[in-house]
Image (spheres, rainbow, N blue to C red):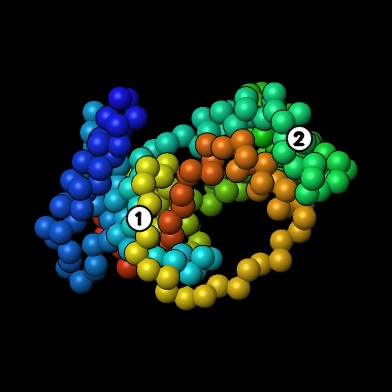
Amino acid sequence: MKAVEKINQELNLENNLIELLKKDLKTKDTVLVAVATTIKGTSFIYVKEYFSKTSGLVNNYSLQLGFSNENAIMNDFEIIKNSKEIVFENLKDKYSIIEIEKAFNELYTSLEKRSSSEEIKEKLRLENDSTINRSDAQNDAYIHLAKGVKMNKETRKIYIIGLEIKKTFVEKRVDVKPTNSKTNTIIKKEITKFLKFRQNKIRNFIFDENEISIQGLKINQ
């Protein structure tokens, strides 16, 4: 029964967002491609016909905004802590033990560092740790405009980040050639998919500054 109620809530949410979007398809000279709303203190956004250059697909998305990436990292670290045996069992017929071990340990170490306390992170900064340095650089590169919305200081591109609630296929626009990823990268992706990492549900949409208008969000000044 709870599963049915959740599906109905998601459908109602998306329908409400779509109706809002239809009311004002243009704001001045900028196409309105995203509309947001807040329900019981939680912000949601509907992104219309987003084209992904990496997949060549166009989809509509319903997202929960302001979802903490830090919480997702903590969640995923707790999952991987006790999952080594089942991960190895799941992948042993496809990859060597050495390959699985390397990928698993790198993924584990990265999550451990990123989910550590500020005191430990500060110590890692003093040691010039590459994982923390990359994380800090990512945070410093953006201006936060609203919950789940940020702008790259250098490129001025707008980023919308949220937890995917629903994705609806619209069309395949172009064929994209598959990338030749390293085995280590492929194994890491398989591990995160197998363990159903929360980070895998976080979506990042990129727009030029002049090609997006968002209705329903309060932008920080």
* Residue 25 locus on image (x, y percent): 17, 64
Is residue 206 visible in the rendered image? The answer is yes
Element at badge 1? strand
Crowd around label 1: few <14 · some 14–19 · many ≥20 (10 Å): few
Label tally: 2
Q: Residue 136 has which mark?
A: none
Depicted 21 relative to depicted 5: above or below: below
Q: Residue at x 34, y 30 (%)?
A: 3
- Specify the label residue 168 is tagged with: 1
Residue 145 visible, this orientation: no
Side (left or right) of 104 relative to 212: right
Look at 43% across and 60% down and name the residue there: 206
Image quarter in which the N terminus is found: top left
Most foreground residue, 116 or 93: 93
Instruction: Of the two numbered discs 2 and 1 on the same chain, state the one appearing first in sequence.
Output: 2
Q: Amino acid at mark 1?
A: Thr
In the picture, the disc for residue 89 is 2
**Tag in front: 2 or 1:** 2
Residue 101 found in image quarter: top right
Q: Residue furthest bottom?
A: 174
Residue 114's spot in the image, x, y percent?
Answer: 64, 34
Of 155 and 84, nearer the camera is 84
Amino acid on which the number 2 mark rests in the picture: Glu
Using the numbered discs, state the Cα–Cα distance from disc 2 to disc 1 in whole angstroms.
34 Å
132 left or right of 203 in image: right
Between 39 and 201, the one lying in front of the other is 201
Q: Position of residue 93 (x, y in %)?
A: 79, 45
Please give the name of the residue rendered at 15% of the width and 52% of the height, measured from the top-left corner. Answer: 19
Q: Residue at x 15, y 59 (%)?
A: 22
Residue 97 position, x and y percent, is 86, 41
